[in-house]
């Protein structure tokens, strides 16, 4: 009887984990650190993973918990008072597509954390409402409500009407704004 080691599956989820971490942290280096911390926690606690369940959901839950733990910790730390670090984080877009994506990211960043998280889990990462609700520890209706409010706010901030064409940068953006999943991302 051959049993595959669940650790072998961890690497399959790295791109999605990194994308989710970047959407939460808005910083590639911090996101990479968070993904690494998540992998260490998953590796160390692989015995707690239940075979036959959704590895990706398990990893995203660990990642999400790691993010919120680091946020709580950062509230006790000293801020970047002189702005030295902040000045080095942003990069100006190179062309119009980057400008549209920058506008989208800026609008996404203004959403409340719970709405942005729900939208990214359901719209961008492709989790079902049920899976997202379980990961966040809330009712399915709460996730649906957060997602719908986030979509409506984003569409309003970006000047999109329900009947208007959505000429955005990519399928992932349209997937986040649209109730139907457009992207395989």
Image (cartoon, rainbow, N blue to C red):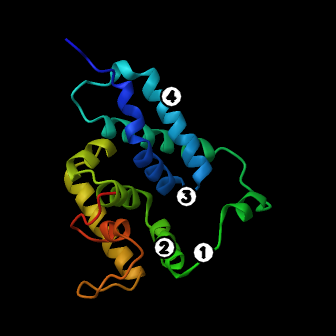
| The image quarter in which residue 176 lies | bottom left
- Which mark identifies residue 101? 2
Mark 2 or mark 3, which is nearer the start of the sequence?
Answer: 3
In this view, 30 is above or below 43 = below
Separation of marks 2 and 4 at Cα, in angstroms? 32 Å
Separation of marks 3 and 4 at Cα, in angstroms? 22 Å
| The image quarter in which residue 88 lies | bottom right
Separation of marks 2 and 1 at Cα, in angstroms? 9 Å
Quarter the N terminus occupies: top left
Nearer-the-camera pick, 120 or 171: 171
Residue at the image position 44 percent from the left and 67 percent from the top: 111
117 with respect to 33 (left or right): left
* Image coordinates for residue 133, horizontal then vertical, percent: 26, 48
Mark 4 or mark 2, which is nearer the start of the sequence?
Answer: 4
Separation of marks 3 and 2 at Cα, in angstroms? 13 Å
Residue at the image position 24 percent from the left and 63 percent from the top: 181
* Residue holding disc 1: 93
């Amino acid at each position: 009887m051959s049993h595959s080691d669940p650790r072998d599956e961890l690497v399959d989820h790295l791109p999605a984990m990194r994308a989710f971490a970047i959407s939460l942290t808005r910083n590639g280096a911090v996101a990479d650190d968070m993904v690494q911390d998540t992998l260490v926690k998953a590796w160390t606690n692989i015995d707690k993973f239940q075979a036959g369940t959704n590895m990706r959901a398990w990893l995203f839950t660990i990642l999400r918990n790691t993010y919120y733990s680091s946020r709580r910790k950062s509230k006790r730390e000293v801020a970047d008072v002189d702005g030295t670090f902040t000045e080095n984080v942003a990069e100006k877009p190179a062309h119009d597509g980057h400008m549209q994506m920058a506008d989208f990211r800026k609008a996404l960043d203004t959403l409340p954390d719970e709405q942005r998280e729900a939208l990214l889990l359901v719209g961008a990462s492709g989790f079902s409402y049920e899976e997202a609700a379980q990961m966040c520890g809330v009712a399915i209706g709460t996730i649906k409500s957060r997602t719908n409010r986030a979509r409506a706010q984003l569409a309003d901030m970006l000047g999109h009407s329900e009947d208007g064409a959505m000429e955005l940068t990519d399928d992932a953006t349209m997937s986040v704004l649209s109730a139907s999943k457009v992207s395989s991302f």
